């Protein structure tokens, strides 16, 4: 059985009939959109999507910083007075 990562689910037919009701009923939580009882998409609030994009960007920057930190040849020695 496929796991659902939402407390609420709606079929594609329900979504077509009344998308505003589904969004409002979810109260900001994700909604699994089902097709033949399988999750085919997740409907999430715009704020949640924007936050996920920010977190992905933060993860990319963290990876870049770690890569640069691990290359000691590129380190620049700086004293506190120089900052």
Image (cartoon, rainbow, N blue to C red):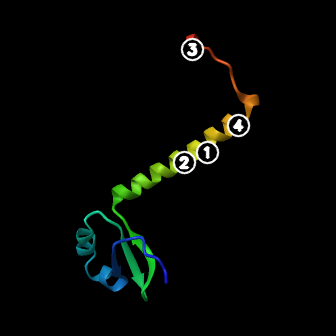
Rendered image quadrant of residue 18: bottom left
Secondary element type, mark 1:
helix
Q: Which residue is mark 4?
A: 70
Secondary element type, mark 3:
helix
Do callouts 3 and 4 mark residues in contact (Cβ within 8 Å)?
no
Q: Residue furthest bottom?
A: 36
Do callouts 2 and 3 mark residues in contact (Cβ within 8 Å)?
no
Question: How many C-alpha atoms fall within 10 Å of the one at disc 1: few (<14), some, or many (≥20)?
Answer: few
Please give the label number shown on residue 47: none
Cα distance, mark 2 to mark 1? 6 Å
Please give the label number shown on residue 59: 2
Cα distance, mark 2 to mark 3? 28 Å
Mark 3 or mark 4: which comes first in sequence?
4
Mark 4 or mark 1: which comes first in sequence?
1
Residue at 40%, 52% (x, y): give it.
Answer: 51
Left of 55 or right of it: where is 14? left
On the image, the x and y values in percent for residue 78 come to 64, 17
Residue at 38%, 75% (x, y): give it.
Answer: 32
Cα distance, mark 3 to mark 4? 22 Å
């Amino acid at each position: 059985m496929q796991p659902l990562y939402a407390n609420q689910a709606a079929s594609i037919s329900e979504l077509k009939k009344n998308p505003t009701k589904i969004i409002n009923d979810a109260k900001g939580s994700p909604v699994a959109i089902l097709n033949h009882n399988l999750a085919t998409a997740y409907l999430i609030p715009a704020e949640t999507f924007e936050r996920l994009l920010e977190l992905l960007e933060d993860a990319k920057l963290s990876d870049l910083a770690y890569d640069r930190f691990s290359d000691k040849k590129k380190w620049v020695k700086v004293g506190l007075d120089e900052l």
